[in-house]
Amino acid sequence: MSVRNIFATAQAIHTEVAARLGPPEEGLASTTQPVIMMSLVRGTRGYIEKISNQVNGAYENGWYDACAVMLRRLIETLIIEAFEFHNIETKIKNPSGDFLYLRDLIDKALSEKSWNLGRNTKHALPRLKEIGDKSAHSRRFVAQRGDIQPLLSDIRTVVQEFIYLAQLK
């Protein structure tokens, strides 16, 4: 049997095993940390760590819309965490008891008197919301690396500030 045949057989076995097993139950760890440094979220909440991993994994695989949508979810989650920590979550719920949409969460976070958001966070939140909204809701918008990459500093600023506000670290 030639090396070429051995290689082809090994590839066929790998493909067959992957097809039968399917993707991993909980996903894989991203191999890099291009968007969210895991040191920022490690030890906070498991779901925050997993969402951050998905942001990173989507970015490193070039799935920029998925990255932006997961980033949007992370920001939403961190704002809610901050309000809950300060026992003022009723300020971000509608009359039915559901949390508000991101636009309203951001407005409430920006005007909240229990904390004083930094200038950079105040400017970054609308920019991060915009890319998340485009990726989640615009039929013809397809995010590219150049849409996310310029926001990396804003992402770190917002994530870190809300982690501290929620005293998750």
Image: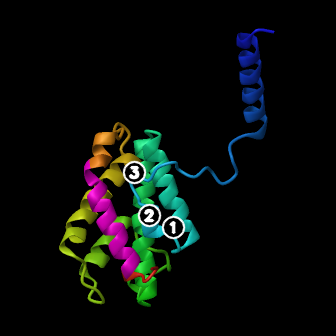
Residue 28 x %, y %:
61, 50
Q: Based on the displayed image, in which of its 4 quarters is residue 167 positioned?
A: bottom left
Crowdedness of circle 1 by 10 Å Cα count: few (<14), some, many (20+)? some
Crowdedness of circle 2 by 10 Å Cα count: few (<14), some, many (20+)? many
Residue 94 shows in this picture: no
Q: Residue at x 48, y 60 (%)?
A: 52
Q: Magenta residues, as a range? A: 150-164
Q: To which residue does mark 1 refer?
A: 48
Give the Cα distance between marks 3 and 1: 16 Å
Q: To which residue does mark 3 refer?
A: 34
Q: Which residue is more in the foreground, 36 or 114?
A: 36
Q: Find the residue positioned furthest to the right.
A: 1
Q: Residue flagged by tag 1: what amino acid is it? A: Ile
Which label is found at residue 74? Answer: 2
Which label is found at residue 56? Answer: none
Q: Is 7 on the left or on the right of 133, as rendered?
A: right
Is 155 covered by the magenta stretch?
yes
Quadrant location of the N terminus in the rendered image: top right
